Image: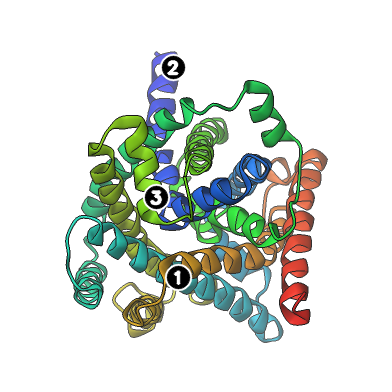
Amino acid sequence: MSRLINIKATGWSLLLWSIIPAAFIGPGTVTTCSKAGAAYGLSLLWALTFSTIATFILQEAAARITIASGKSPGEIIALKFKGKNTRWLKMLLFAMVTFGCAAYQAGNILGAVIGLKLLFDVPQGLLVALMGVTVVVLLWSGNVRLLANAMAVIVFFMGIAFVYVACRTAASPEELLSGALIPALPEGAEYIVVGLIGTTVVPYNLFLAGGLSKGQQVSDMRIGIGLAVFIGGLISMAILLTGTQIEGEFSFLTLAQALSQGLGRWAETLFALGLFAAGASSAVTAPLAAAISGQSILGAGEEKWAATSWRYRTVWGLVLLTGLVLGLLDLKPVPVILAAQAINGILLPAVALFLFLAVNDKSILPPKFVNKPAWNAAMGLVVLTTLGLGLYNIWRALTGS
């Protein structure tokens, strides 16, 4: 009987964690991964290998914190840094997460709109306005789950299409292994590498991981996260491989054409629908994640940060407004989306560092849930690698080199 219960629990865990791939396969992933493949071939595949492993390490830590304490990572951070003297630290972390969500939101809105424009000849301004109204209604009412589930199904089928086309690539197994395991940094690729990390190890997904883990066993959680992150990483790599088949300058249209060459003209429609679905679901998730981070970091358990409070709604409203304004400016979508991923890749080390400190605090977590030396080494490597790449890109931007 207990064996049957364990099987059911594991199955439920896998179903629950299947949300994760849909959460980080957004317009940013499609754009950054395909652009990396089109510009640098297989040489940046290792960045996705690193990012996938890093995603598992950080999300496992965030989920373990919640299982051990019953509190979200944001609440734990608020508990760890309590008092007037540390309030600025919590404000700083909240500001970084919110800024990252706002950067993502610009790409989400533009990605969804470009998906629709590939299907219908409608002015971009009208599509942006309709997206804005729809997202406001959904966030104000709180009825976001049905949309998220429906969009996740479409994104999943788009991912399957990318995997199928990637399997038809002419690359040999040796070339794939070399690209996936041996780090290489072609000239000018640093920006794309940080973007690949930022679009895979999504900072706000660390808070999502904590929320999904409540009530689970650690073993089931690890299986669920492991499979979900593996699927997400596999789809991201498939998108990069598809990008290597693009002929000429990269654009969403040439990416759709690369899919259609492997599957037929109907694949262009699937890609357009998938890009819209990825953008639409993420356009709801990013503002919501920012508001939830404020609720957990700044106002855990306080009525003034309830989901119907003006503080909560102001946060998601500002994030949404950022995306809408940038969408209405008629900017080129690819540079905006790439910049959003790079910004989050630069912000990631700070969020990961806060998580590292929390998961090692024995005053908050029972000893058996605190990081072991091997996990600390792995998390430390993630923090140092992302910090080094982020600082290098900032230095290049400041010096103009």
> How far across and down, in percent of the image, does residue 71 sit?
52, 57
Going from the N terminus, do you reach mark 1 or mark 3 first?
3
Q: Secondary structure at mark 3?
A: helix
Going from the N terminus, do you reach mark 2 or mark 3 first?
2
Tell me the kind of residue under disc 1: Ala
The quadrant where residue 385 appears: bottom right
Eyeballing the image, is 164 above or below 328? above
Mark 1–mark 2 distance (CA, rounded to whole Å): 40 Å
> How far across and down, in percent of the image, does residue 122 sit?
17, 68
Residue 2, label in figure: 2
The colour mode here is rainbow
Note whether residue 361 is visible.
Answer: no
> How many residues crowd around disc 1 within 10 Å: few (fewer than 14), some, or many (20 or more)?
many
> How far across and down, in percent of the image, does residue 262 sit?
36, 31
Mark 1–mark 3 distance (CA, rounded to whole Å): 33 Å
Q: Residue at x 28, y 53 (%)?
A: 277
Q: Label 3 near label 1: C-beta < 8 Å?
A: no
In the visual, does 123 lie left or right of 325?
Answer: left
- Mark whose residue sits in front, 1 or 2: 1
Q: Secondary structure at mark 1?
A: helix
Specify the quadrant that holds the N terminus: top left
Eyeballing the image, is 255 above or below 194? above
Residue 232, label in figure: none
Mark 1 sits on what residue?
290
Mark 3 sits on what residue?
254
- Please name whichever residue, 47 or 229, is drawn nearer the observer in this view of the structure: 47
In the visual, does 216 lie left or right of 267?
Answer: right
